[in-house]
């Protein structure tokens, strides 16, 4: 008897091994979880680029413009630590070819020419600018808006229309400068009042406080800001997130379930806080990437970084985050494009996210196999991909080294469009390039992006080791997907 039982258990275990590996999703049974906007994914350029007088960025480069246009519609946030040392100067001109050796935590100038270049660039590529104003310009313990007024008056004169403003950056992290949450709350009220006195700038919105996350002190900072009444002066609550420091980054951590899952409780924590104080306002990841301190060399700019990025977009959207600003478009090891202005793997992932993924967001139960992570949204019907209403896009990541079969029982008789990414060369996870459906992606010429075509098929789907990608079901006929 006991012997038979043991055999039965062994047989069941063997069968169960199968059912643990197989992942199933029913497109018709998905429940709507959240709604996101068409500019859910945005990018940043760090204010330190202004200190470097834009460094290698060439706003006239056809390649740079092509890559930027590919991401439109898109928010560009220019902010970061250096925003609190940036002083607009209407009278200085760029020193011909002389670039001051960049020094951290010292004041520097943004010239008229630099502000013009930035505004002309966003306008040319169809992006919307979010600009972070300097909160360290202070007088008697309060923000001194004199320099901001100069910048805003010039902005009106030129007819520029930044979409949004911020004030200060990660004050909870840069505590040496002693600007507290209680002090900055009235500063935001001052900014709100100042902007409303300049109707030419409308429409615009205000984001704050750009608390740095990682530790609970950011949540404390945000909560003190709200308690001091700061919530009334912002339209969008922002905070920052990095999974780890660049010094402690490893390839393994970049596709570890534990690391990926570390984001969820932090988001829930901040979302709950915001629900309590500002229930009607949006919450954004106002600056976010894989690892802080510029990104990890030969990790943050490689194929493996795409796991952290795609998963962050998924977890954030399903929990109700309304905007994710990727640090950075250009700059550091975590740029979507590298220092030669060529796209890194995350660029391609981002462009397809924008073209294929829209609102609403559906809840997808986490598959029994923890290596396979999966998200579902309505398909974007307003992009060059030409999908029509009713279509559903799922995106999935296989963190592990074995193929995972995915069954979609209610779609077996309909075609699906697969956009599957894999490492671009033999270095595997640390590959510099990325393949889409088996073909390495690269710009073939500076004036247009290569076609990003799906493999059209039917039936069950095999997600190979370390692959990730998007699957569109054009025949899903979900009524929510209009
Ligand atoms: C701008 O620069 C000029 C000279 O370079 C200086 O005299 C002036 O004080 C500066 N203005 C601001 C607002 O820093
Ligand atoms: C930057 O300039 C402002 C205004 O002149 C001054 O109050 C502040 O101390 C300066 N900051 C640094 C780090 O030099
Ligand atoms: C911040 O405050 C501390 C003590 O509270 C003081 O020692 C320090 O000098 C202050 N820093 C600045 C930049 O004002
Ligand atoms: C810190 O935040 C996490 C959520 O990110 C929470 O689970 C934990 O209890 C907090 N710790 C403290 C000491 O408040
Ligand atoms: C479609 O996208 C274009 C370009 O981003 C935008 O101007 C337009 O408002 C969008 N249409 C709808 C219906 O969302
Ligand atoms: C696959 O990954 C597991 C850990 O998840 C490891 O134990 C195993 O050695 C790996 N196999 C190969 C072929 O790399
Ligand atoms: C798919 O087609 C087969 C054969 O026509 C049919 O038996 C099955 O019920 C269909 N499945 C679905 C989900 O429509």
Image (cartoon, rainbow, N blue to C red):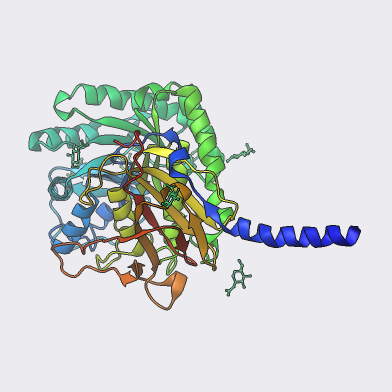
* 71 shown above or below 233: below
Q: In the visual, does 404 lie left or right of 237?
A: right
Say which residue appears at 17% left-offset and 63% top-offset. Answer: 63
Q: In the visual, does 12 lie left or right of 144?
A: right
Q: Residue pushed farthest right?
A: 1
Q: How many marks?
A: 0
Q: In the visual, does 371 lie left or right of 29?
A: right
x and y percent of residue 164 in the render?
26, 35
- On-image quarter of the C terminus: top left
- On-image quarter of the N terminus: bottom right
x and y percent of residue 179 in the render?
44, 35
Say which residue appears at 31% left-offset and 46% top-offset. Answer: 42
Determine which quarter of the picture holds residue 467. Answer: bottom left
The quarter of the image that holds ligand 6 is bottom right
Task: Give the camera-side residue of 474 and 364.
Answer: 474
Task: Give the camera-side residue of 129 and 402.
Answer: 402
Q: Is residue 108 visible?
A: yes
* 3 shown above or below 355: below
Determine which quarter of the picture holds residue 12. Answer: bottom right
Say which residue appears at 24% left-offset and 51% top-offset. Answer: 71
x and y percent of residue 328 in the render?
33, 54
x and y percent of residue 209 in the render?
40, 35
Q: In the visual, does 288 lie left or right of 121?
A: right
Q: Is residue 178 visible?
A: no
């Amino acid at each position: 008897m006991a012997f038979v039982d043991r055999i039965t258990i062994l047989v069941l275990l063997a069968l169960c091994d199968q059912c643990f590996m197989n992942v199933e999703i029913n497109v018709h049974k998905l429940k709507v979880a959240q709604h996101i906007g068409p500019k859910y994914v945005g990018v940043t350029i760090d204010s330190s680029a202004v200190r470097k007088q834009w460094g290698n960025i060439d706003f006239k480069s056809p390649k740079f413009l092509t890559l930027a246009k590919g991401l439109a519609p898109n928010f560009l946030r220019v902010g970061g630590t250096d925003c609190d040392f940036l002083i607009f100067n209407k009278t200085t001109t760029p020193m011909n070819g002389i670039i001051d050796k960049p020094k951290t935590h010292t004041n520097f100038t943004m010239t008229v020419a630099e502000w013009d270049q930035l505004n002309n660039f966003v306008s040319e590529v169809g992006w919307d600018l979010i600009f972070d104003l300097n909160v360290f310009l202070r007088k008697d313990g309060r923000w001194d808006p004199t320099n901001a007024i100069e910048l805003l008056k010039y902005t009106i004169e030129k007819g520029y229309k930044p979409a949004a403003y911020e004030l200060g950056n990660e004050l909870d992290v840069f505590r040496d400068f002693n600007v507290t949450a209680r002090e900055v709350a009235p500063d935001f009220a001052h900014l709100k009042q100042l902007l409303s006195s300049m109707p030419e700038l409308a429409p615009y919105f205000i984001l704050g406080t750009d608390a740095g996350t990682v530790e609970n002190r950011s949540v404390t900072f945000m909560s003190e800001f709200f308690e001091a009444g700061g919530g009334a002066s912002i339209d969008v609550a922002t905070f920052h997130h990095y999974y780890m420091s660049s010094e402690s980054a490893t390839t393994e951590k970049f596709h570890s379930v534990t690391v990926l899952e570390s984001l969820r409780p932090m988001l829930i924590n901040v979302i709950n806080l915001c629900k309590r104080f500002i229930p009607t306002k949006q919450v954004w990841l106002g600056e976010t990437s894989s690892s802080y301190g510029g990104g990890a060399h030969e990790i943050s700019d490689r194929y493996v970084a795409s796991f952290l990025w795609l998963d962050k977009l998924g977890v954030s959207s399903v929990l109700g985050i309304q905007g994710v600003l990727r640090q950075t478009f250009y700059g550091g090891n975590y740029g979507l494009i590298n220092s030669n202005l060529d796209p890194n793997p995350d660029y391609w992932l981002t462009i397809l996210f924008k073209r294929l993924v829209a609102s609403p967001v559906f809840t997808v139960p986490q598959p029994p196999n923890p290596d396979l992570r999966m998200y579902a949204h309505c398909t974007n019907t307003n992009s060059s991909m030409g999908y029509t209403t009713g279509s559903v896009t799922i995106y999935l990541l296989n963190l592990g080294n074995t193929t995972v079969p995915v069954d979609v029982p209610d779609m077996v008789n309909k075609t699906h469009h697969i956009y599957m990414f894999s490492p671009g060369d033999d270095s595997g996870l640390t590959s510099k390039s990325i393949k889409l459906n088996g073909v390495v992606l690269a710009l073939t010429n500076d004036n247009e992006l290569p076609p990003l075509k799906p493999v059209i098929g039917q039936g069950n789907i095999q997600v190979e080791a370390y692959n990730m990608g998007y699957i569109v079901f054009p025949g899903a006929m979900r009524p929510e997907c209009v």
